[in-house]
Amino acid sequence: MPLQRVKMKFRSPKRVRFAIDLDDMSDNETSEGNPRCYHDDPEEVPVSPDQMQLLEVPNGNRPHRNHDGAGMSGNNTSRMRYEERRRRHSSADEDDLALLHGRFEKVPLKDFHAEIRAFKDVEDFLSRTLLMLDLQKTGLTQIIDAMVKKILEKKEVLAQTSLDEARQAIFTQDSVHTLSKTIQGTMTSDESGFDFDQNWICVMCDIPTLTKRHVVIARLHTPANLGSTSQEVQFVILVLAPVREKSTKSSLETARTFATLFLDMDFRHQLLMAESEFEFKQLLHTRTKLLIEEQGLPENRKSHLVLSAFEQEEMEAEKSRCPIGQGLVRDVKRRLPHYLSDYKDGIVGNKTLHKVTSTTFFLYFACVLPNIAFGMLNDNNTAGVIDVQKVLFSQCVGGVLFAVFGGQPLIVLLTTAPLALYTKIIFSICEDFDLNFNAMFACTGLWNAFFLFIYVFFNMSKLMKYSSRSTEEVFSLFITFAFSADAIKDTIKDFNKNYHTDSCQGVTHSNSSNQNASLLTNTSLTTVSTVTTTSPVNLTNSSTVVAPPGGGMLEECLRENSILFLLLMLGTVWLGITLFNFTKTPFLNAGKREILADYALPVAVLIMTFFGSYVFREVKMKPFKYKEREKMFELAPLHLLPPGAVFAAAGLGFSLSLLFFMDQNISSALVNAPSNKLKKGAAYHWDLFVVAVINAFLSIFTMPWVHAALPHSPLHVRALADLEDRVDQGHVHQIVVHVRETRLTGIISHVMIGLSMLMLPYPLAYIPRPVLDGLFIYVAITALYGNQLFDRILLFFTEQSAYPPNHYIRRVPQRKVHLFTTLQLIQLLVLCVFGFSPIPYMKMVFPVLIMLLMPIRHKIIPHFFEPKYLKALDGHAH
């Protein structure tokens, strides 16, 4: 019979008429007579049609039967009884009517090799054997009652539930004995077509009062007719599970385990021949071991781990005879044929123009606002040598050059907080030893480029094969914390400056206590002198200075500034995240929701800027420091450096090159991750070469350095991607369907950043500083989406029944998952200690620590885990 949705209308609790509605079906449900299938888990691929499959039959697997087990007498008898019933009860009470909905859904076979829960389910059953051999029952009700009573023989179960409660969960209606949820095997062959495996059936249900799973297997003495799809049943498997249970231990997952075992016809024949419970259990145990071995063979794997791009790079390198410079040559050969399509793919295609436009604006705001923040930081750290104007120019030139000449155009270059800290260290060294900062900065940058050239020509990126997913995610999470820490530090600094001041507490710095007392009563009323500095947009401070009679001086009390700072920062985060997740709401239609989500960051920045600069214009907030430069392109006087300083710059340049090497390659790895489904290939060596050339050019003009940025680069990929929501046992996750690999977004956005130099100081000064900090937090939060380390951290605080049924939850014991997460957190903590240390010279060790993450992962971590568990936790699953 074709697999269609079955609708059943109850006229009476004792009489049921089945009506298969073939017209009221959607195309997807009726095409080719197959059920609608969902393949949510990328780790599990459905078996081929010519093999046996499992079919979950949630409702209506059996037509009406009398209580004695006899079947109905045919269509004519049914119609006569129905007509008689209809005439007799023409005005029947509505309470006698009901609707029953059924649906066939294909579920994947249990992977005994990869999913540890499969073996544990069988072992748990064997340790608490509930077997009923040669059960002499033929009716469905009698069989189920006998199996439930077998479970209720346990005192702890009997205290939790009852036979009636179990019946209500197993059957759709107590008076109409139709099973609610079942799993059966199916077969597809050229001779017989599609058919059910009618020799066995697995019944499952969830009971709220249970606290533990229970499985009972019954072998019937004679085959029983339990319905149109179960006419020769000899084995019945009953699974009872609590409602709130871990996803991998649910009734469906447990039923999949035993249903997969019973699919094999030869195995069922052996079970029929078993003469004792011990022999039956031995057959189950042997079959489980055999499945683990068979499914572990490469030709039978239904899921696999994809080689990372670095491993693929190494495989290609082994084929070449002269390795020097081969990585660079291979990258060019790989990417050059796609160069023209990199521009074409930004124009042609469904939704392409919309995605490119929204991504361009996202990149513009995501880069220009951090540029302003890091420009202010560098201005303070270098006494104005590197300021906002230079940072914007560096971003524009570096971004455009990389977008045009880089191998992987989806990587975003940016000057980052670690680079700003390195600049501060160089400036401190120059002050301590009376060196020219411009020359020292340029010399360090040139040494950095020199070491990067060495890494490129000797194919050092192949070392990144040791940089597994865990290393990438630890570093990515550290960068996320760094963005959040910058925003938090700015907030604390503003509150200390404007909110927690002595003047706000009514305390003066006078020597007379009487003057203090007098001031406490008159602070809010006595204004001796007011100094106000105005600007075209009223953004500078209007400060009120109170001078008491004795000469005591009060600091400013501007609590409204701090409150507005917090409001604008959190408002930017809230509005941005709300719009970013707008596709998950039911409002508007799908197209409008997607547009709002794509423009989440620009809209949030513009709206909160309007509030900060116009709605709350009475609150005076300082704009960023800006001083127009007379000379932008001034060559660094390298000849002023003594020889000792040149060698010191070499040491600084080597340490800096390690930071560039790790940042660039980790960002490339995250962009080229298999889950992003990029088609044109990676270019690790060529990208590093282009970055070295760009930074050598920037160094000789004392421009700030740039390298691949996290989390901007992965977010750039996501912004250009078409995403789909997948649902697996109630858990929703997004997968990338297609990514537009184009250079246009990088080129256009960085040209816009260059044009922003014409908007200094206004209108860029309209953007309040708290909006910049809000952007930092927004970028940090959105970067957490898809970070497996963060997802596993949340498992510490998540109820087990709400665990997502993803690949590592299925394949790795829970304790091992938490142990792996704990070890990653320890590594993250060490990075944070050195990365956020107030001692500047400790930050110089930071790149070395990042490099140490790789030997730690491959030399220490394996002592705690089996290789198959590490592959599941630390591999790129596909």
Image: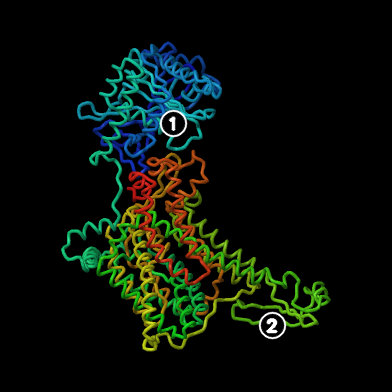
The answer to which of 405 and 657 lies nearer the viewer is: 657
State the image coordinates of residue 641 (x, y, percent, origin top left). Answer: 39, 86
Q: Is residue 28 left or right of residue 559?
A: left
Q: Label 1 crowding class (10 Å Cα cut-off): few <14, some 14-19, many 20+? A: many
Circle 2 packing at 10 Å, graded few (<14), some (14-19), many (20+), is: few
Picture residue at 67% right of the left edge, 81% below the top: 532
| CA distance for labels 2 and 1 | 74 Å
Residue 629 point in image, percent of width and height: 47, 86
Q: Eyeballing the image, is 299 above or below 846? A: above
Q: Residue at x 57, y 68 (%)?
A: 490
Whole-percent x, y for residue 611 in the image: 59, 67
* Residue 345 pos. (x, y %): 30, 62
In the displayed structure, would residue 520 be above or below residue 354? below
Q: Secondary structure at mark 2?
A: strand
Mark number for residue 68? Answer: none
The quarter of the picture where residue 702 lies is: bottom left
User: Seen in the image, is 708 located left or right of residue 684?
Assistant: right
Which image quadrant for residue 525? bottom right
Q: Earlier in the sequence, mark 2 or mark 1?
A: 1
SS at badge 1: helix
Position of residue 764 in the picture relative to residue 231 (left or right): right
Q: Observer-nearest residue: 450 or 617?
A: 450
User: Of the residues shown, which amino acid type is indicated by label 1?
Assistant: Ser
Q: Which residue is mark 2?
A: 531
* Applied colour scheme: rainbow
Quarter-wise, where is residue 634 in the image? bottom left
Residue 229 showing in the rendered view: no
Residue at left offset 57%, top offset 76%:
623
Q: Amino acid at mark 2?
A: Val
Task: Write down the residue under mark 1.
Answer: 251
